[in-house]
Image (tube, rainbow, N blue to C red):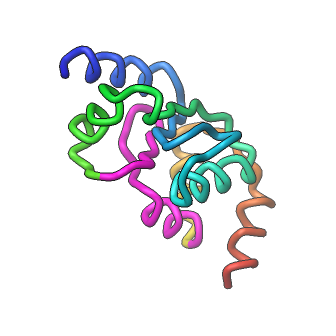
Amino acid sequence: MTDAKTRIAETVSAHDVVLYMKGTKDMPQCGFSSRVAGVLNYMGVDFADVNVLADEEIRQGIKDYSDWPTVPQLYVKGEFVGGCDIVTEMTLSGELDQLFEANGVAYDKAAAEKIREANA
């Protein structure tokens, strides 16, 4: 598992925003991954996507790496943020905006507001 942990550590440090997910950002393979990728795509966030279905070692390795049992998993500047429920809550509360701003991650503020308005 060390090889997977090394690859994961390299990936999360090489990109400002990384989403470990089932499928890809253009073709998610589960509803939870689709929701998080959809939020990031809608907000115009430039993020790397890692399809855990394509690599069993990474699929288990990411769970061990974060000590979080489910996918998707969002990382910002190398730090684990959370899964679908946490990202959804952070989006609706504005915390995700604050996290992006604090870390210099570009996103569309108007799109973030539209998400909140649509879910108010």
Is residue 58 depicted above or below 102 in this figure? above
The percent position of residue 67, horizontal first and vertical second, equals 21, 45
Magenta-tinted stretch = 70-92
Say above or below: 88 vs 64.
below
Residue displayed at 75% across by 53% down:
42
Q: Position of residue 21 (x, y in %)?
A: 49, 42
Query: In the image, what residue occupies the spot 52% across and 39% down?
Result: 103
Q: Examine the structure image and report whether residue 74 is included in the region drawn in magenta.
A: yes
Q: Image height check: is 37 above or below 79?
A: below
* Quadrant hosting residue 35: bottom right
* Residue 86 image position (x, y, % from top left): 43, 63
Q: Quadrant of the C terminus?
A: bottom right
Q: Residue at x 50, y 43 (%)?
A: 22
Q: Position of residue 83 (x, y in %)?
A: 41, 55
Judging depth in this view, the residue of 71 and 56 nearest the camera is: 56
Q: Is residue 61 depicted above or below 35 in this figure?
A: above
- Is residue 46 found left or right of 14 in the rendered image? right
Q: Is residue 61 left or right of residue 29?
A: left
Image quarter of the N terminus:
top left
Q: Is residue 108 left or right of residue 2?
A: right
The quarter holding residue 7 reads top left
Say if the magenta span includes residue 19: no
Q: Nearer the viewer, residue 65 or 24?
A: 24
